Amino acid sequence: MRTRTLRARDFHYHRTLSFSRSFNQEINPVNMLRVEHARGLRVRLFGYSARCLHKESQPAVALNKLHTKWLGRWKKSFNNGSLHPSKPVISGEQKEKPFFCLSMFPYPSGVLHLGHQRVYTISDVISRFKRLQGREVIHPMGWDAFGLPAENAAVERGVNPADWTKQNIAKMKQQMELMLADFDWEREVDTTSPEYYKWTQKIFTLLFEKGLAYRKGAEINWDPVDQTVLANEQVDASGKSWRSGAQVEKRVLEQWFIGITKYADALNEDMKVLDQWPDKVKAMQKHWIGKSEGAEIKFPTEVGLEIAVFTSRPDTLFSVQFLAVALNHPVVLEAQKSDSELRDFVAKCGDGEIDPDSKAGYKLKDVKVSIPINVNGEKNASFNIPVYAAPYVLGSYGHGAVMGCPAHDVRDFEFWSLHNPGVPTIQTVGPKDKGNSGSENVFTAKDGYLYDSSKLPNGLSSLGIFSNLSSKDAMEKVVACLEEADSGQKSTQFRIRDWLISRQRYWGAPIPIIHCDSCGPVPVPDKDLPVLLPQVEGKHFGKGNPLGSIDSFVNTKCPSCGSAAKRDTDTMDTFIDSSWYFFRYTDPKNESLIFDHNKASAAIPIDLYIGGVEHAILHLLYSRFVSKFLGDCGLWSGEQFSNEPIKRLVTQGMVQGKTYTDPETGRFLTPDEVDLKSTSGPLIKATGETPNVSFEKMSKSKYNGVDPTTLIETYGIDAVRAQILFAAPVSDALNWNEDHILGIQRWLRKVIAMKDDVLAKASAQYHQDSHADEFKNVTINGEQFESVKLTKNETSLFNETQFYANRIAQSIGTDLSMNTVISDYMKLTNYLQQVLKEDQSIMPNLLIDSYKKLLIIMAPVTPCVAEECWEGLHLGLGQEWKSIFWQTYPTAHTLTPPYRDYKIIVNGKKIGTVERIKNLDSLAQNEIVDALMSHELVRDRVEGNEIVKVIAKKDVVSVICGSATTS
């Protein structure tokens, strides 16, 4: 970039300049303006007259055709594996990590909806913006393609799931192209590709080797007709199979689990580093992990057995009035042998006759327990506490048993009241300095106090050594006494369960385990990965596990001893596939490693991850777990961020469509049933009544869906992208109203028309005002000048353009305030339009500079309009077109004029304006006073009075004097 002093002659065409210089040569176009008013010649700019540049003489630009033009041009001009041009990455060592911008990859259903358009627009805008700032950006896309939907679709259509998936991927890539999503397609991954699921299987074998992948019995949904396992979504509300219609049974089968509970504490504690995650998501994960600190207590029975429970409230131990145990608890299984009524009760629960969430229960006969210690902290053996078998107690959670304190837990109170009506509760904890408030009240606060002996209810004489202790102190003392009596201990428990990953389905990554009678389960060696899915025919989707019916797949040899063995016939949960896919994006073509350590460590954690809040629990939690596990295995280095994979998470709101319903019947109305042209608002054509109008989640049944392709073909992709961002903040629900997009179109047409106005204005005669301020080292229109003189209006134009460029950069790059970005685009456009309309002389270079900056800052959101205007401007200036995406986003530089005009207020009364006074922004109070007093207007009004204070803000100065003499 050359540096020189800008002179008056630079604004006029020099007669001696030869036209033999190529138009493609890097020449400042304004230096080639020819002004020959003495000869009466019309101003010309590279063959374009001011008249022919007028916007009314130019053909209108069809906004809905621009994407067709520019997609073709970009593809032809740029061969970089991307749909659109991206500024080439400078070779050599990068000074900062690449900016990893990621939107959650989709399941390839074959159709993208407006919700997809929203999330891809957000990520695309941010990635384009970062590239304009000179950052290396990773903005990949892939396909979460395994799973039940594809398998079901294949069964229904009689096609292979692989073929169905490939067709849908091809369709969706075309739709993404139409949406102008500038993804790094050279990084594309497909979870159904053997090149991908080879490494999914490798992660499984690593988990197996570390003892984190194991098999155990688990309850599943069993279709007795099709002889197959059903996912929860394949069972209807009445408990019947979606396909056979059979009543679904509960069975226990051997299933594969991943030991995520081993990482429960790390997953819980490390959320403290996720300060750029939504609080809502972190709260959901904390609840799901469910860390609870308390005590494990062993209640002895009369027959010598013990029933262990976990409680977070050991201070309420002396309020226990019952225990409830799961239906599969050992004490229940033993009692069933001699109790036919208990067997009937358990059977009814298993058949669904009794709601598992109800307060139903069965009191075990001849089974009672004792509170393990007495009020003096000594071992106790008073067997007077009943035990209930209750379906609400989960056998898979904790010890499958809970202690019931009706006086201190609402659920326990409801259960006790149902089974023991009229029997009072035992309340031992309450507010400080207050006695028992009555046995029918439930005191659940954790900051209470244990009663002293004079206030105890229900005949208790004393709480002994625990009397008057706070709940906190009582917890510690109870635990200490339990440990002394060998009846309990301090304990931490988590609600989260180990991750069940077995799927008795075909369309998934096969579990790489071989079962040998001699060796047990043996992992498939690395050299034999991937375990490929076999080709299947329709008959294999009949009964049972599809892979289990293919002998050529099942029968194999043990890799350990060489004996005949059988492959595992389960496939993996698809959340395994999506738990690590972002790592593969960093090194997608690697054939010998899951991914390169250095590449992954350089790119991850993801700088920005965008997706729906519905993934808060499973996908996001599993991704955190797998990332930590891979870090512990040494496959990447993320210790500085606790091996967390995602730095910032954004959960975009749902896109909702306008819905019309009949006020009488509540029936959803089709668009054809509603008259939308009535001046009084929408009317039902058949009845003339006004329908109920609301915005709801888009669905076929509500007739409120919107096809993005239709919108793009009608309004143009730039208008659709801008309206999606403008309609609502990123995290809020977006109520799509098609009428509002017309305002966006008007703005875009204004920007397009402005190009001709800029060219015409820039070619007019320019005479600089004598009152111009000198500025040092200023860049205008890509050229840096050691010195340049600018008038007040010119300085304002430069600074106002920079102000919006800076604010928009903050909104896109930091705040993600996309709706305000669009409004700022419009404000800057209106400002520039006003400057062009005003009859004032503005340096042509500066006009071009401001318009160029507008186009550059618009480019991430409206690529086609920005590129169209960029090309037109350069053709009008006789310059070679280089894509706007090869430009650099404006820097945050503004000009501070040495002199300004100020409105003067003295003691609250405006007295006038002083012109070209020294800039007061950085002056001390005494310097401001001296500058003001040099002007007669101020001097006359305040002379003889003490100036107490001066406040200078922007272009207003308020002077406060000791006495008011301003009249």
Image (cartoon, grey):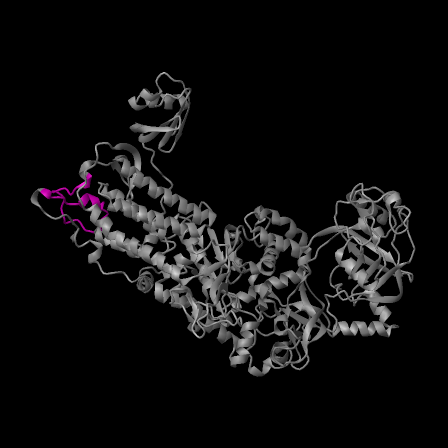
Quadrant in which residue 538 is drawn: bottom right
Q: Is residue 528 left or right of residue 73?
A: right
Residues in magenta, as a range = 10-37
Q: Is residue 102 above or below residue 343?
A: above
**Magenta residue check for 650:** no
Residue at 44 percent across and 75 percent down: it is 686
Q: Is residue 773 above or below residue 206?
A: above
Which one is nearer the viewer's eye here, 494 or 655?
A: 655
Q: Is residue 26 left or right of residue 697?
A: left
Residue at 92 percent across and 55 percent down: it is 381
Q: Which quadrant is home to the C terminus?
A: top left
Which one is nearer the viewer's eye here, 432 or 556?
A: 432
Residue 932: horizontal and vertical position, in percent? Answer: 34, 23
Q: Is residue 456 above or below residue 422?
A: above
Q: Is residue 805 left or right of residue 534?
A: left
Q: Is residue 687 left or right of residue 202?
A: left
Which one is nearer the viewer's eye here, 602 or 445?
A: 445
Residue ranking furthest to the bottom: 539
Residue 596: horizontal and vertical position, in percent? Answer: 52, 56
Residue 176: horizontal and vertical position, in percent? Answer: 42, 64
Say if residue 80 shows up in the picture.
no
Q: How many marks?
A: 0
Which one is nearer the viewer's eye here, 439 or 560?
A: 439
Residue 849: horizontal and vertical position, in percent? Answer: 28, 45
**Magenta residue check for 35:** yes
Q: Main SS type for the magenta part? A: loop
Residue ranking furthest to the left: 39
Say if residue 495 shows up in the picture.
yes
Q: Which quadrant is home to the N terminus?
A: top left
